[in-house]
DNA sequence: GTGCAAAGTTTCAATGGGTGAAAATCATGA
DNA sequence: TCATGATTTTCACCCATTGAAACTTTGCAC
């Protein structure tokens, strides 16, 4: 059932994303108007909104897919897999997504990261996306280990892990580290969170 | 140096905050227009923006003060205080702020919480405020323990702790818990994060 | 093919947050 | 009282976002 309708829609969607990213890179996010994006993609301004709910959404167009992949990991766990091992798997998949290219090109990653770091609206949005992911991951985890893990503990686990990783990445990037170093920081942070904060500082 | 100028400014600021919260409570956040807030506080619409940078800011007018209090804790630590103990202190102070009233009345707390939970724009903003707090706390911690704790570990600690607590609170509230139960959840989450995720699930 | 309904697009008009700049007010201190 | 600098108001915009109506394209039945 892949008629012309469907193909055309995908083409337009792609055109919008690419036009937008190109313009953002050239002139900056706030300096780019929706009218310009639409013009560049050769559709009317109104049509933009039948593809994306907002200007910000263009930047996060693939976050849904990424989350699904993580949820898939939880769903596909072996029935006797211990929770800590699964958590580690989730961390690894997340880090792979950040470097490996998959359906969307790694090409855009630096641009997107720079946008998120520098545009307040996008930063807020990124946090929101992360938050939604955390909530859904929490629910998935709770469902998967319903017998052994109540919601609060599941939330604590997800929150601690992602919280530590996120903040470590930001702190790393903030001091001028490369993306590779930031990834290392994330891995280290995950380790700290897994091991516990108890022995931090006096070692 | 408390002339009429200063006093008037404070009065106007207060009037704006109260007008806004009243209207938000009555008609909802999105349904309330800036023009209405300004009218209710008896100033021009334009003047609103010389007190707050945006509509959202009214809701978060005191977040700065709260953070300062936490940073104060870090600054006031005893020179030999072990990091884990300080972290615990920070958690306790945060929880106290949520229930104790101080310079801003507890009266508004439920309204604000409800607003944040239900208005996407405010939710995003709340996450952003929290994020900034995390970054500053990280820096403070790193400075305080410069010899023993690099930035990444400091970030991991702050991220894990606040991440766990935040998500636990949300998960708790989401399943219909009372504020008191949500606080308990936060405490439990902090404990889990301190102890480490390693032994979660198999116990 | 022809014709029609559904899907998708454009155009148009409006709302509301947010900003810049000039004109009007007003507290303060000489 | 008067000059001055700080605030406030007015006014004129920009731009994201939304609703509705008119129009075009695609898919499908005959």
Image (spheres, coloured by chain):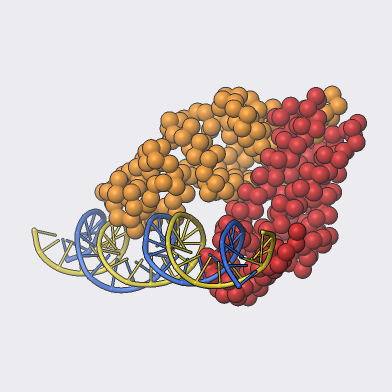
Chain colours: A orange, B red, C yellow, D blue
Q: Nearer the viewer, residue C3 or B148?
A: B148
Q: Is B87 rendered above or below residue D12?
A: above
Q: Is A93 rendered above or below residue B22?
A: above
Q: Residue at x 68, y 58 (%)?
A: B61
- Residue A97 x/y as whole percent: 53, 33
Q: Residue B72: in sight, yes or no?
A: yes
Q: Residue at x 83, y 50 (%)?
A: B93
Based on the displayed image, in which of its 4 quarters is residue B173 positioned? bottom right
Based on the displayed image, in which of its 4 quarters is residue B6 positioned? bottom right
- Residue B74 x/y as whole percent: 82, 40
Q: Residue A69: in sight, yes or no?
A: no
Left or right of A42, for residue B107: right
Q: How many marks?
A: 0
Q: Nearer the viewer, residue B65 or A29?
A: B65
Q: Nearer the viewer, residue B85 or A73?
A: B85
Left or right of B86, for residue B38: left
- Residue A28 x/y as whole percent: 43, 41
Q: Nearer the viewer, residue B8 or A67?
A: B8
Based on the displayed image, in which of its 4 quarters is residue C20 positioned? bottom left
Q: Quadrant of the C terminus of chain A?
A: top right
Left or right of A137, for residue B178: right
- Residue B111 x/y as whole percent: 70, 67
């Amino acid at each position: 059932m892949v008629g012309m309708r469907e193909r055309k829609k995908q083409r337009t969607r792609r055109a919008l994303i690419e036009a937008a990213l190109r313009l953002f890179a050239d002139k900056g996010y706030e300096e780019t108007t929706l009218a310009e994006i639409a013009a560049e993609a050769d559709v009317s301004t109104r049509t933009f909104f039948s593809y994306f709910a907002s200007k910000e959404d263009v930047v996060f167009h693939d976050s849904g897919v990424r989350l699904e992949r993580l949820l898939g990991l939880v769903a596909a766990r072996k029935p006797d897999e211990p929770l800590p091992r699964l958590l580690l798997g989730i961390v690894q998949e997340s880090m792979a997504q950040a470097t490996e290219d998959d359906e969307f090109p790694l090409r855009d990653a630096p641009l997107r990261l720079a946008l998120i770091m520098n545009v307040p609206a996008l930063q807020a949005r990124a946090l929101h996306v992360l938050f939604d992911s955390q909530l859904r991951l929490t629910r998935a985890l709770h469902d998967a280990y319903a017998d052994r893990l109540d919601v609060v503990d599941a939330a604590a686990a997800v929150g601690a892990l992602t919280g530590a990783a996120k903040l470590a990445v930001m702190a790393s990037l903030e001091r001028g580290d490369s993306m590779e170093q930031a990834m290392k920081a994330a891995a280290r942070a995950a380790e700290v969170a897994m091991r516990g904060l108890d022995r931090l500082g006096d070692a």
